Image (spheres, rainbow, N blue to C red):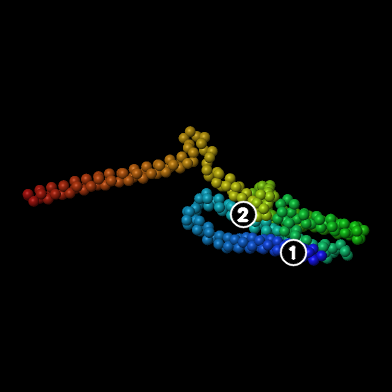
Amino acid sequence: MTGELSGSILQSVVSLAETATTLGIITINLLAVVVFAFYLLRDDDRLAGWIHTNFDTRETVFEEFLQAIDRDLSSIFFGNILNAIITGTIAVISYSVLNVFAPAGAAIPAAALVGSLAGAASLIPIVGMKIIYVPVGLYMAVRGVVTTGGESLWFVVLFAIVSVIVVDSIPDFLLRPYVSGKNVHIGSLMLAYILGPLFFGWYGLFLMPALLVVVVQFAVVVVPSLDLGSSSTPDSQPPLQRFSAAVTTEADSETAATSSTPAADDGSTDADESTTSESAADDESATES
């Protein structure tokens, strides 16, 4: 008995230590993410100014590319979080008001918690908050049949209608178009949210959409500027050759301008010498006379 008790205690201590280690790692990672996001949001203007100063990217394709990425990332991440907060607030208010009219024993369980979870679940593509209010509605229906013999099922139906129309559909149709990524295809964004955790772990939920935005904006902004399809005319050249030719032409023009300057100087010098000799001849003739 003593050996079994000691082994059980040791196993509990090991399990507790592993749990504490896991929680510590999660806390450190979360702290690092929060600190990185905070300083990136606070000092983004300074970072952009440093890039413009050292790389001279103003009014270039690179600047337009970075601005497009920043716009879409802000729209996707901040916009979706804002949408989740507003949706959760609407859900909490709606469910709390419904509980005022609920029959005895048929109220929504933990209405504020269900509303908050519904708002957080709106971040999940396609399924969204249905993963919350559908199980809750089924639980309420089973409870109503068991406890009241089905007399309170009308409240379950009312809960379902409010959840689908007020909590889910109205914010999704009216609010999400203003805060979601408008330049990113919703199907591609859904695949990014689904495949991200599979490829990169839990942080792939944020990394994969960011990579998707970079790829999409590269195709939209950078690729057209390469002018890859202009080789159909006989006189056209690939972009690098056209760039080299343009540089060579400028160099030749500068060389020609430099070489023409001494010639002009020589002409002015000869003119000055002839003028000086003519003046000397006039002085000699005046002296003889």
Residue 200 in the image: x percent, y percent?
65, 51
Distance in Å between CA atoms under marks 2 and 1: 48 Å
Residue 165 against residue 97 in the figure, above or below: above
Residue 100 in the image: x percent, y percent?
83, 65
Q: Which element is circle 1 on?
A: helix
Taking the spot 77% from the left edge, 65% from the top edge, the residue there is 6
Circle 2: residue type: Leu
Image quadrant in which the N terminus is located? bottom right
Taking the spot 70% from the left edge, 61% from the top edge, the residue there is 18
Residue 144 in the image: x percent, y percent?
89, 59
Residue 239 against residue 182 in the figure, above or below: above
Q: Which residue is mark 1?
A: 10
Residue 3 in the image: x percent, y percent?
78, 64
Can you tell which mark lies on residue 186? none
Q: On the picture, is 105 further left or further right than 270?
A: right
Give the image quarter of residue 12. Answer: bottom right
Q: Which residue is mark 2?
A: 73
Circle 1: residue type: Leu
* Discs 2, 1 touching: Cβ within 8 Å: no
Q: On the picture, is 195 further left or further right than 255?
A: right
